[in-house]
């Protein structure tokens, strides 16, 4: 037993070296493990630890040996060894993914045999593990490979589902999770089984917590001695004892409901009217965090399912009013739950789900609902700021140590995620309601403006910039009144030490250049200077900085396009061209390369240069963009580039064209010749 434990610990602590070249170690491990059944079980656990964090490529060279040994253990008469082998095999399949296909025919008969024959009460866990393994193997190999066996497996699970199982039967939890994995594997082909799966799943999701409540200062303790599944928590002036096994089943069921809605989309529609009233109240289920998390994650999935079903005519005659009715039920409940949520991490998840729900509901939200969302965002910002101030005070305490410092770091990271989600929510509201949202933005300014401060985190500064970027982009002329207040912040942030902040700032400069008109004109000189600093920085193309570089090039192009009369075009446009193509920010790349096409189409003299001296550079950019496929240009832009190349072929003297092409790299020459000759 001691040797097996040592092997397991060795694999856990030496995982990185094992992954680098462990075939010899694994053979040794398996030789030792044959000594005793317990050691075999520990060896299976070692394989589990080895495989669970492996990529398919790392695991591939060892699959033949690992799987053949696990199949030997599956045939071992000792149940403990078989259970360990099943768990290890499930992990190996999950980690190896499509590489597992070649072993499928050898493995699946053993798994099905255990599933069908392990019927004794003493074999319940063995059967449960076989369900887990079969479902993970099915997900690894995919629907086409698994389809023939899936029906047989489904029939066994449906038979079990319909049988009377004891409340402590481990098969219940394993079966709920197996159904969800099978749904992911089979997709829409799983729909015929939903009528069997859903009733017990809803029953598990609706379980009432088994709770004992006493006064927090009472001398009467809740007895935990007879049942290790009882846990106690103190809530206010009450001490609460909770049977965790019930809560874990409830959490698993809620997660499965979310999984089905996510996977089946409009196919989940028939169950929405039962699932929504089950999950919405659980947004405030304070007995168990996993239950709340699952309910939070499910909210946008339910709305998406209803919306798709209506759009595709699968909602039994219901129209958009049904989506609004569901939205009116879900969004206020999310906002109310967010107001009362005690855990920062779950606050961030709630904001994320709220953002998705707003995206789905869009204009269906009324002014009162938008008001409640905005008021709650104010509350969240205030509460978060208070928590951060309190944490800063804790660092000044005499007993503050490194361990508490790590804890504070984690808490601050969670706080940044909250602010990130606030930014996303406000961005969605601005994009949805545009100028009609500006009165709310005015109210929020007092909360947003402090986030620009140098004493704030880089993430807060980035979010504040992104919010203004959205206002400037979506509200256009109506946003001009904010330029005097916010654009100086953008210009200053172009020099920020954080690359993400710089990216947001230079993107905003581009937006203001595009939509700011004469209001932006006095700022052009300073904007050009700031953009030049970003573009010409020695480390501009470093992986950390290249997104800011791409956005700065895009912003420079917009100044060239919309403010040509205010710049030295003969100098700045060639400088912009020299930066092309941009290759990291795919969205901005498409914008920039479309602009290049437009300028070539109108024979822009500053772009082409005296005697077309910049034409080789333009052709070089076209070649790189076209070779990249759809990544750097839209289909329409790529088509325009091809047409321009063919026009050049027809209008330029052959000797001049040949000379121009000869200045390009061989690969670029071949790409352009291929396009022009096709």
Image (cartoon, grey):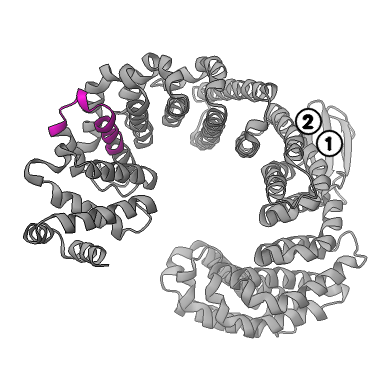
Say which quadrant the C terminus sits in. bottom left
* Predominant SS along the magenta part: helix
Label 2: element kind: strand
Marker disc for residue 42: none
Task: Answer above or below: position of 600 versus 378.
Answer: below
Q: Is residue 152 visible?
A: yes
**Residue 42: image x %, image y %?**
63, 72
Q: Is residue 365 left or right of residue 121?
A: left
Q: Is residue 154 left or right of residue 34?
A: right
Q: State the residue at coordinates (41%, 30%).
A: 458
Q: Which residue is mark 2?
A: 235
Residue extending farthest front: 651
How far apart in space, not on screen, are marks 2 and 1 (Cα)?
7 Å
Q: Pick whichever, 130 or 428, lies toward us.
A: 428
| Magenta part of the chain | 553-570
Tag 2–tag 1 contact (CB < 8 Å) = yes
Q: Which residue is mark 1?
A: 240
**Residue 471: image x %, image y %?**
47, 25
Q: State the residue at coordinates (51%, 28%).
A: 400
How many neighbours does mark 2 have within 10 angstroms: few (below 14), some (14-19), or many (20 or more)? Answer: few
Q: Quadrant of residue 170?
A: bottom right
Label 1: element kind: strand
């Amino acid at each position: 037993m001691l040797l097996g434990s040592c092997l397991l610990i060795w694999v856990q602590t030496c995982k990185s070296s094992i992954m680098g070249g462990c075939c010899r170690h694994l053979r040794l491990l398996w030789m030792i493990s044959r000594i005793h059944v317990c050691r075999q079980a520990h060896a299976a656990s070692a394989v589990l630890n080895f495989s669970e964090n492996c990529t398919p490529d790392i695991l591939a060279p060892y699959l033949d040996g690992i799987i053949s040994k696990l199949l030997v253990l599956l045939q071992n008469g000792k149940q403990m060894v078989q259970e360990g082998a099943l768990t290890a095999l499930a992990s190996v399949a999950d980690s190896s993914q499509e590489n597992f296909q070649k072993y499928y025919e050898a493995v699946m008969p053993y798994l099905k045999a255990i599933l069908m024959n392990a019927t004794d009460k003493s074999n319940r866990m063995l059967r449960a593990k076989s369900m887990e393994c079969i479902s993970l193997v099915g997900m690894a190999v995919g629907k086409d490979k698994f389809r023939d066996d899936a029906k047989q497996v489904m029939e066994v699970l449906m038979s079990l589902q319909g049988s009377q199982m004891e409340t402590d039967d481990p098969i219940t939890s394993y079966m709920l999770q197996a159904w969800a994995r099978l749904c992911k594997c089979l997709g829409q082909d799983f729909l015929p089984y939903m009528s069997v799966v859903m009733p017990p799943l809803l029953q598990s999701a609706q379980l009432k917590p088994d709770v004992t409540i006493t006064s927090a200062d009472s001398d009467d303790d809740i007895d935990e001695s007879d049942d290790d599944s009882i846990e106690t928590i103190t809530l206010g002036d009450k001490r609460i004892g909770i049977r965790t096994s019930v809560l874990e089943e409830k959490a698993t069921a809620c997660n499965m409901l979310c999984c089905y809605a996510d996977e089946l989309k409009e196919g989940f529609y028939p169950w929405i009217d039962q699932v929504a009233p089950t999950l919405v109240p659980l947004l405030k289920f304070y007995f168990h965090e996993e239950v709340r998390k699952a309910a939070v994650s499910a909210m946008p999935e339910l709305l998406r399912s209803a919306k798709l079903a209506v759009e595709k005519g699968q909602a039994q005659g219901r129209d958009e009013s049904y989506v609004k009715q569901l939205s009116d039920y879900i969004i206020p409940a999310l906002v109310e739950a967010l107001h009362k949520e005690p855990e920062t991490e779950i606050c961030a998840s709630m904001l994320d789900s709220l953002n998705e729900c707003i995206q789905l509901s869009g204009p269906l939200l009324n002014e009162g609902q938008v008001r409640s969302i905005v008021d709650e965002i104010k509350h969240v910002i205030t509460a978060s700021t208070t928590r951060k101030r309190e944490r800063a005070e804790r660092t000044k305490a005499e007993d503050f140590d490194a361990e508490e410092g790590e804890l504070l770091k984690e808490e601050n990271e969670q706080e940044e995620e909250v602010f990130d989600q606030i930014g996303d929510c406000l961005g969605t509201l601005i994009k949805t309601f545009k100028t009609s949202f500006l009165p709310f933005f005015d109210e929020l300014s007092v909360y947003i403006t402090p986030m620009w401060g140098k004493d704030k985190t880089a993430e807060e500064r980035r979010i504040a910039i992104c919010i203004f970027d959205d206002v400037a982009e979506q509200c256009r002329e109506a946003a001009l009144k904010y330029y005097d207040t916010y654009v100086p912040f953008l210009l200053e942030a172009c020099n920020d030490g954080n690359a993400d902040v710089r990216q947001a700032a230079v993107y905003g400069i581009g937006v203001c250049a595009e939509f700011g008109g004469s209001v932006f004109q006095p700022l052009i000189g300073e904007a050009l200077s700031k953009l030049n600093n970003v573009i010409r920085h020695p480390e501009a193309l470093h992986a950390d900085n290249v997104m800011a570089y791409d956005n700065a090039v895009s912003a420079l192009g917009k100044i060239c396009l919309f403010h040509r009369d205010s710049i030295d075009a003969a100098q700045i446009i060639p400088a912009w061209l020299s930066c092309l193509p941009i290759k990291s920010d795919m969205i901005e790349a498409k914008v920039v390369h479309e602009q290049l096409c437009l300028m070539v189409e109108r024979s822009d003299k500053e772009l082409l240069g005296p005697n077309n001296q910049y034409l080789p550079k333009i052709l070089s950019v076209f070649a790189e963009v076209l070779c990249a496929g759809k990544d750097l240009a839209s289909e329409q832009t790529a088509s325009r580039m091809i047409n321009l190349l063919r026009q050049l072929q027809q209008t330029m003297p052959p000797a001049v064209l040949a000379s121009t092409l000869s200045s390009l790299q061989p690969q670029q020459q071949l790409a352009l010749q291929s396009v022009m000759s096709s």
